[in-house]
Amino acid sequence: MTTTRMPLRECSLAVLLGCMAQASCLARSSGPLTIQEQGSFFVGGENRAVSQPAAGLMPAQTGDITVNQMYVEYQIPLHANRHVPVVFVHGCCLSSKTWETTPDGRIGWSEYFIRKGRPVYLADQVSRARSGFDPTPFTQARAGTLAHAQMPSILEATHQFAWVVFRFGPKFGEAFADEQFPVQSADELYKQMIPDLNATLPQDANPTWKHMAALAAKLHGAVLVGHSESGFFPARAALVDPSGVRGAVIIETGCEKLLPAQIAALARIPTLVMFGDHLGDVKGPFSWMAAYDSCNSYVEQLEKAGGDAEMMYLPTLGIKGNSHMLMQDKNSNQLADLLIAWIDRHVEHHAH
């Protein structure tokens, strides 16, 4: 495949070579996992007055419910004050399971980062998994006060859709020769794919943006990492409140067109964009080359505004075959080391 406008960033190559020179770069960490603290909490949420008809064992009710709260779980290793916390947010039709044990049973980025001394926070997007959503339109439709056609849609990705869009291969069941995703364990990924209720949310101001910003502020500074559907969320969170956003990592998504004032504000935050391989080698409803081009343009705009921004396109670094699910690919530890090295150089170095 031939592509254009994929510049090799010298700093990325230096990070890669430095990482590969270390014996631990590709090795799986082992031994007891020692942590200082772990737990979970919710960020945000709004009260909504409701009147609900009886359903099952639940009687009819009138009162208040909490909706659109964001669930966060965390683990903090020993001596965690040495490093900036990292917040991971998942993509469409998935949950924070994305960052945990890989489909083929290896440690995921959450554990790997903890073993590298990084406090890790995993968030479920509002409307997904353990986070809240507003059930009111579904209740109203059941009661007959809202037309069924007005109910928000519930998204689910099929196995066939995911195989191609996630770039496991050119068509369902056929993998690229150099494919890094463990396709023999694809069924375990499919189990992670859950109903997506994003259609219940305001599309011009997703609550997850402000909750991510609030979480970063609560942590007194964090690196926000988004993937796929949430890839641009770190930038959106910083536009809500930049006070706690120490770094933004944008993985495998399209980058939005922003106003000059927004670019100027985001240029103050170190930004890394990561893409895998085979961007132009699949046909489907989504153009990965267009997504790459939009993010390359975004990086260039940040740089022109004086920002510290980098496009890390893995094939340019000699890392081939990576899918959309970088954190679950067979070389996920190597990619995690690249991300950790970038954080150390561009976020923590400036902090000290």
Image (cartoon, rainbow, N blue to C red):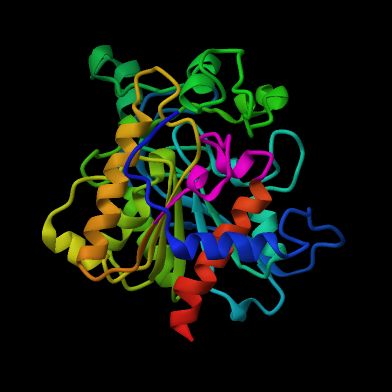
Q: Place residue 85 in its image quadrant.
A: bottom right
Q: Place residue 127 in its image quadrant.
A: top left
- The residues colored magenta run 311-331
Measuring 68% from the left and 59% from the top, which residue is drawn there?
20
Residue 78 rendering spot, x and y as whole percentages: 72, 75
- For residue 137, side relative to residue 321 (left or right): left
Relative depth, front residue between 25 and 237: 25
Relative depth, front residue between 313 and 337: 313
Residue 154 rendering spot, x and y as whole percentages: 39, 23
Relative depth, front residue between 66 and 83: 83
- For residue 6, side relative to residue 340 (left or right): left
Measuring 35% from the left and 17% from the top, which residue is drawn there?
142
Quick check: can you spot residue 227? yes
Quick check: can you spot residue 46? no
In the depicted structure, whether residue 278 falls above or below residue 313: above
In the depicted structure, whether residue 9 falls above or below residue 275: below
